Image (cartoon, rainbow, N blue to C red):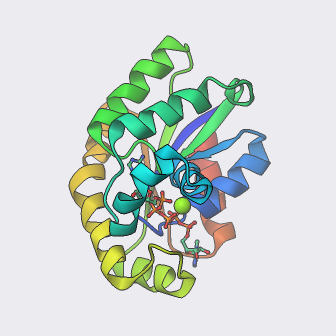
Amino acid sequence: MLKIVLLGAPGSGKGTQGAELATRYSVPQIATGDLLREAVAEDSELGRAAKAAMDAGELVSDETVIGMIRDRLTSPDAANGFILDGFPRSLAQAEELDRLLTELDRPLQRVIHLQVDNEEIVQRLTDRGRGDDTEETIRNRLAVFAAQTEPLVAYYEARGLLTPVNGSGTVEEIQERIVRAIEGA
Ligand code: AP5
Ligand code: MG
């Protein structure tokens, strides 16, 4: 049973590493960004409400993402574990996640903090070119991460759950570091 959070700035590799871990450990990767992009593509009410914030690189409301996570974590395929990618992203989300996992009797095992320099991040995202990968939006996503998400580093450190991992290098090297962090080797 793997129950982890991948915490890291935009472009730090949460999606890339999360997908590899999901295959390796046979648990779902639950990425709020992907769920929100699906909702936008379907033009659902939730998607229409989220789109402006996503285009600007701001956070979508806590209520919206917490609702999505609650649905996702209580679905059967998450019964044996999960990899959370891009959630939680604010203190309110982290506190709500704690409450939900206590309720489900499935406490977090580890929070992996992927660390990558901002210049490398801007380079990676500019090369990728997703809808929200314009230079201006990337800068704002980084500022939003620093202001609203980085406080979670101290939050999880205080709970003894945080492991910093160097997020620079090849995908394989970084995967190896994460596996060592998870398996405590
Ligand atoms: P989200 O989709 O979560 O985007 P993000 O956090 O900005 O991060 P990215 O997905 O861009 O990067 P990543 O860390 O997954 O890295 P990746 O592996 O893709 O969120 C998007 C938006 O949705 C937010 O701005 C917000 O509006 C909203 N949202 C989402 N969750 C929310 C929440 N909880 N609360 C409120 N709002 C929320 O890698 C990036 C690139 O680098 C790729 O091209 C990849 O191929 C490349 N790469 C990866 N690893 C390496 C490597 N080792 N070397 C070289 N290149 C690499
Ligand atoms: Mg991602």
| Number of disc labels | 0
Residue positioned 43% across, 33% down in the render: 66
Q: Quadrant of the C terminus?
A: top right
The vertical placement of 43 against 25, above or below, is below
The vertical placement of 34 against 88, above or below, is below
Q: Quadrant of residue 117?
A: bottom left
Q: Is residue 29 left or right of residue 129?
A: right
Visible in this render: residue 156?
A: no
The vertical placement of 65 against 78, above or below, is below
Q: Is residue 27 left or right of residue 106?
A: right
Q: Quadrant of residue 4?
A: top right
Which residue ends up furthest to the left in the rendered image? 147
Q: Quadrant of the N terminus?
A: top right
The percent coordinates of residue 123 (x first, y second) are: 45, 86
The percent coordinates of residue 137 (x first, y second) are: 34, 75
The percent coordinates of residue 143 (x first, y second) are: 24, 66
Q: Is residue 20 left or right of residue 57?
A: right
Residue positioned 33% across, 43% down in the render: 61
